[in-house]
Amino acid sequence: MTSDLAIPTAAQAAAIDRRDEAEALDQRCALAFTRARFRLPDKLIYLDGNSLGALPMAAPDRLAGVIGGEWGTDLIQSWNTAGWIDAPARVGAAIAPLVGVGADEVTVADSVSVNLFKLLAACLHLRPGRRVILTEPGNFPTDLYVAQGLAALVPGVEVRAVPADGLASVLGPEVAVLMLTHVHYKWASIHDMAGLTAAAHAAGALTLWDLSHSAGAVEVDLAAAGADFAVGCGYKYLNGGPGAPAFLFAARRHHERIAQPLSGWMGHAAPFDFVDEYAPAPGMGRFLCGTPPILSLSALEAGLATFAGIAMADVAAKSRALSALLQARMAARAPQLALASPADPAARGSHLVFRHPDAFAICQASIARGVVGDFRAPDLWRLGLTPLYTRYVDVWDAAEVAGDIIARGAWRDPAFARRAAVT
Ligand SMILES: Cc1ncc(COP(=O)(O)O)c(C=O)c1O
């Protein structure tokens, strides 16, 4: 790297109006080198890393080693000799700097959904007498569903969903926990984590943040915000592969008082004592439930290695530049697509969403032309910008394809109306 490499500002990226200028941005970008850490199909413009991160170059060999050597040869000894038993804590420690907390405050287990259940229950336990889980309507469905499931299980507990601008006024003595998704999965809008956490604390409530669209994409400083708890996906910006296990964070000040109801043997203080009575492991260990998924954890560890030597401030800066460029190019080439994300790049995460009555068909027609985004019902086309591997020229080309598809009505082909199970 030479010293004239830098991350373009959002304004610089948005100002370009020729493809070769996009190529020049890639040449000058201080984060361009990280694309080589991924295996991406030739000619594919992959704008869906916010759903499933790309394959890290090192992951196939890592998995082959775990399967062939650790599982195939060393078999059960690998729980000790290959450090399998420590994998949840070790991989959690690799996530910690990406979200601004200590290595001992994060572990990896289960899915986001399951971890939400554990942490919401822990919050109710920490705030006896308070019976409200406060959230917002339109939060990611699993967050709402899990809260509803817990409320159905615990007599007196209620889920209250209040639009974001009314949250502060609803925070009161009944609220046990404020549960929000930091970067919204549809709009990409970002909540003020520090402000809302302070408001929750002033009312005596705890906070639980879903970082699924934040971790690895934008700067997150849970410690500075004073956040209590968080969860997040391993398979999006952390590049852990399909169905990668999720992470959970609990602030150290809560560790020894937290009780969670999925008290499986792997969260026991001494699992290999095989005693009848549950006793929680110290610290984050108590959030484990069953046997850790070692193949998936190994893939996630390879995914996290793609962040080696990179500052999240640079990742976030590139995210803003990419999304400013996409916003500008779509406005120029496909003005029929209405931006449904915040207009200010600093006010959004690392994806952009556009509204169009035929968004599904446009999404499918674009995939057929090698531009992969996704569709969110009823009328949103969502395009993810992954700073570690998305290039400025990809963004330029994606907008050209979108403009062409819309101008020619190519999306009207009935083939693009057929829906599969996953959109
Ligand atoms: C904000 C948010 N939370 C949770 C999830 C899914 O969590 P899980 O790991 O339980 O499938 C997603 C998936 O897209 C998400 O966007």
Image: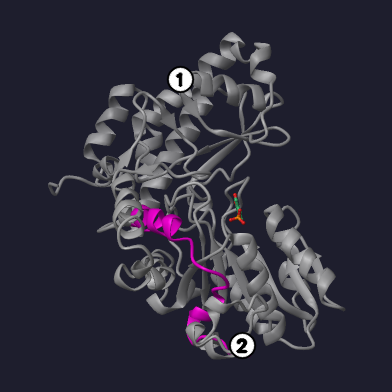
312 to 85, vertically: above or below: above
Q: Which residue is mark 2?
A: 278
Q: Position of residue 107 (x, y in %)?
A: 47, 71
Q: Which residue is mark 1?
A: 400
205 to 241, vertically: above or below: below
**Residue 329 - label:** none
Q: CA distance from mark 1 to mark 2?
A: 59 Å
Pointer 1 local density, CA inside 10 Å: few below 14, some 14–19, many at least 20 = some
Q: Residue placed at 86% from the left, 78% from the top?
A: 155
Q: Position of residue 287 (x, y in %)?
A: 55, 76
Q: Nearer the viewer, residue 209 or 63?
A: 63
Q: Residue furthest right?
A: 156
- In magenta, the rendered stretch is 277-304
The quarter of the image holding the C terminus is top right
Mark 1 element type: helix
Q: Is residue 361 found left or right of 343 in the rendered image?
A: right
